[in-house]
Amino acid sequence: MKFLFVTLLSVLFAVATWAQDDPLGIIKAMEKKMYPNAKTEMLLVHITSQGEREEYKLVSYTKTNNQKIIVRFTAPARMVGSDLIMLDRNVWAFDPASGREVKIPTNLSFGGTGFSYGDVLRLNFSDNYVPVLQASDAKTWTLELTAKERDAPYYRIVLVIDRGFNPQKGTCYTRAGDLVKTMDYTEPKDQGAGTKPATITVKSPLDEKEVSSLTIVKETRKDYPDNVFNKRNLSARLEEKL
């Protein structure tokens, strides 16, 4: 009887350990914490290699762990109205001049900054990448994420996540194995559901002086209806009336 009890405990412990180290489960737990249904005000700052500073102010409306997201620009003036929406891994931008929506590759650099359009839209990892557990210790997991589709912003990402399901560092690579950029997650703050990183800082190996950062300024939890998340709403702006 004692032997059976000890065996049962061993099995339960093994199952619990496996579940805890399940790579997809880790990614989804991180996304649930990082990307709630919310209205989020953000500041994107780009420091050029010449030391010039560029700022973009954005407001995002998100649902379903970022699988549905609208991003609207409030500054600079030249960007106001050139809003973005991501649906089913596809990114669309509204062109105020023509009044039409234009499809944009997620891996395209946003305005010459270190961020891609996929980064600005805070691309959903679990929907776009296949995760594999690379290493784990008492404090962190290290996951290797491989893109499901060729048009993903990066072919491979090595992502370090702490045991509180907060991302710490992402290292992004091309299909050929070349380093594209590093992403550091810092400035932990309580955004209403526990402490999580508020800032992502991006650096490229091509120019160490060039730095881009995206910071959450304010986040308000809110559930938006599905009819908000369609291309026609880029001009209708239904979410602002709710």
Image: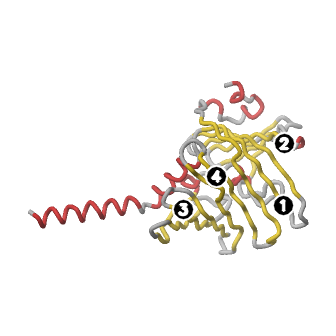
Q: Is residue 48 left or right of residue 84?
A: right
Q: Report how far apart the C-alphas of labels 4 and 2 lie in the structure.
A: 22 Å
SS at mark 2 in the image: strand
Q: State the separation of the CA atoms marked 3 and 4.
A: 16 Å
Q: Quadrant of residue 13?
A: bottom left
* Residue type of the residue flagged with mark 1: Ile
Quarter placement of the N terminus: bottom left
Crowd tier of the residue under label 4, counting other residues whose Cα lies within 10 Å: few below 14, some 14–19, many 20 or above: many
Q: Disc number at residue 47? A: 1
Three-letter code, disc 4:
Leu
Tell me which residue sits at (63%, 29%) in the image. Answer: 227
In primary-sequence order, the first of circles 3 and 1 is: 1
Circle 2 residue: 75
Q: Work out how far the residue at label 2 is from the one at label 3, CA to CA, in angstroms.
A: 32 Å
> For the residues carrying marks 4 and 1, which lies nearer the camera in this image?
1
Please report the residue visible at 73 percent of the width from the left and 40 percent of the height from the top. Answer: 59
Q: Which residue is mark 3?
A: 161
Q: Is residue 223 above or below residue 58?
A: above
For marks 3 and 4, give the one nearer the viewer: 3
Q: Residue under circle 4? A: 123
**Viewer-side residue, 39 vs 124:** 39
In the rendered image, residue 49, in percent from the top left (x then y), is placed at 87, 67
Q: What's the residue type where badge 2 is placed?
A: Ala
